[in-house]
Image (cartoon, rainbow, N blue to C red):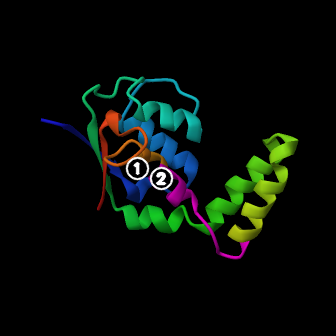
Amino acid sequence: MTKEYILDGSNVTSLDAFYDAISDTLIPGAIWGRNLDAFNDILRGSFGTPEAGFVLRWANSEASRERLGYAETVKQLEKRLEQCHPTNREHVRADLSRAKKGEGATVFDWLVEIIRVHDVGGEEAADRVHLVLD
């Protein structure tokens, strides 16, 4: 039987809160980078998640979708712009401009896309991480 983890989206009010929820839900006690690349690594099973894959049930995902919308996306892209390599600044500025207009992918979209890479049909489907949005 595939292990199921339930992520309570009602507690996800920001990207940092999402990282807290992932820590508590998937990898309690583990120390990790708390960034999108490190989250991707967790889904590969290298932090104590089941090697045979698992189901990630994102309960109250609509609440998360709202809270991880364009306001949070603008906040995260502004942080990224301060820290990114100079060669990436134009790309980040363009993403930031779109987000300020309510266009393009949101933080919620980024997270779902990362998870779906590890789901059936994704580039890393061998990890067998199945996302269920409730």
Residue drawn at x 64%, y 66% as measured from the top left: 71
Residue 43 horizontal/vertical position (percent): 41, 35
Q: Is residue 34 left or right of residue 84?
A: left
Question: Circle 2 is placed at which residue position?
Answer: 113
Instruction: Give the numbered dot on residue 87.
Output: none
Q: Is residue 103 left or right of residue 20?
A: right
Secondary structure under badge 1? Answer: helix
Secondary structure under badge 2? Answer: helix
Q: Is residue 124 above or below residue 65?
A: above
Residue 79 horizontal/vertical position (percent): 75, 49
The amino acid sitting under disc 1 is Arg
Comparing 25 with 54, the one in front is 54
Q: Are marks 2 and 1 in contact (CB under 8 Å)?
A: yes
Is 55 in the magenta? no
Neighbours of disc 2 within 10 Å: few (<14), some (14-19), many (20+): some
Q: Is residue 60 above or below residue 31?
A: below
Comparing 15 with 127, the one in front is 127
Neighbours of disc 1 within 10 Å: few (<14), some (14-19), many (20+): some
Residue drawn at x 33%, y 28% as measured from the top left: 49
Residue drawn at x 54%, y 61% as measured from the top left: 68
Comparing 86 with 64, the one in front is 86
Residue drawn at x 34%, y 45% as measured from the top left: 119
Is 104 in the magenta? yes
Question: Circle 1 is placed at which residue position?
Answer: 116
User: In the image as oriented, which residue stretches furthest toward the bottom?
Assistant: 101
Magenta segment, which residues? 100-113
Quarter in which the C terminus is drawn: bottom left
The amino acid sitting under disc 2 is Glu
